[in-house]
Amino acid sequence: MITAENKTNLLASKQHFEILDGLRGVAAIVVVIYHFMEIAVTDYNKNFLSHGFLAVDFFFCLSGFVIAYAYDSRAPHIGITQFFKLRLIRLHPLVVIGSVLGLITFLIDPYSDLYEVYGLGKTFLLFLSSAFLIPYPAMPERYTNLFCLNAPAWSLFWEYIANIFYIFILYRLGKKSLIALVVIGAVCLCYVAVRATNVGGGWGGQNFWDGGARVLYSFTAGMLVYRLNWVIKNKLGFLGMIMLLLAAFLVPFNDQYNWITEPMLVLFYFPLLVALGAGTALNSSFKKICNLSGEISYPLYMVHYPFVWIFLTYVAEVQPPASSLWVIIPVSALLLIVFSYIVMRFVDIPLRKYLKQKFLNDNRI
């Protein structure tokens, strides 16, 4: 455990947790593969990555840790408006970019005629809801996702809610109050698990509030890991942490026990991984990989799903043999990683740089 003195030094040195960045990228790749796999293998009991959706809970926990580390000492000084500018410039360009890609693929999908069904007016509403993160679960053909053009935006909606609560309330809370809120979040998450037999909701109109329970617990738990100095020194390194993270997603899917195993992973295992990841030593040979993995994680998460929609309609219309899918999925994942890098390098980074220069007095994000 780090001491209070070490924590002060940690803040003063502005340490960057490269391994946590690397793990974020690994989790983003898992999400991409999971989204393809749940279409290719519809029986979750036969899907080796059926718990890949739990990467979102890991993201929330990691976000709580990082936001507390980055802003707990700065929030009283930068003010609410500046905080919102910082977060919007960091997050929202890719929300819009993902929405634009979702619109384009909606219009040109060769295996779907959904545009003809919904027409110009409703399609425009779908785009606006996605670009401005206004939930609009209007498409049963897409399982009433909150954001039908770019499904993963549901977690960004809840991330924004968490950020709003953070700057108004959470950063002001003392440790005891934060612990109480984490316990409340844990109770809510367990209730969701028992009622729904899993914790995989939050993405659609039918399970909207499940997302609130997921972010309430995981975000505040991540904050608590930071506030209580739960940074566990260890020698696992990046590869060891990857193995521990992947183990969570590879837990077998079982309808009888998911309501137990999934909350256990979210409540205890992911905060432990954040604590271990923040405290492990990084081999210098992995530093560039971790940095690149962290940089590409958010672009990959936000631009991949429009292409998954095309994959869905392709599978439904063409019904390709399973042998071809085992080629299409890894190749698609690799291409999306490359595409995400291009989007990040030539669109997202320049756009954020422009917005920072135009709207911020503080260039730190």
Image (cartoon, rainbow, N blue to C red):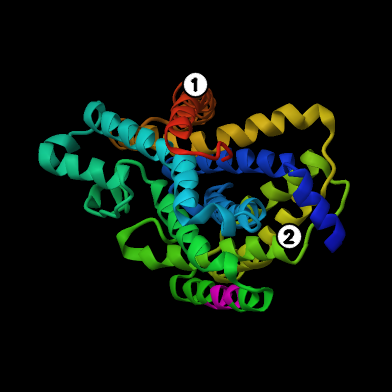
Q: Which residues are magenta?
A: 181-187
Residue at disc 1, secondary structure: helix
Residue 318 placed where, x, y %?
31, 30
The x and y percentages for residue 287 are 76, 31
User: Which residue occupies 41% across, 60% down?
Assistant: 202
The residue identified by callout 1 is 342
Q: Is residue 196 at all visible to an observer of this figure?
A: yes
Mark 2: which secondary structure? helix
Between 100 and 75, the residue placed more toward the observer is 75
* Left or right placement of residue 242 versus residue 353 in this view: right
- Of callouts 2 and 1, the N-terminal one: 2
Q: Main secondary structure of the magenta part?
A: helix
Q: Amino acid at mark 2?
A: Leu
Give 319 or 1, whichever is nearer the viewer.
Answer: 1
Q: Is residue 49 left or right of residue 348?
A: right
- Disc number placed over residue 272 in the picture, else none: 2
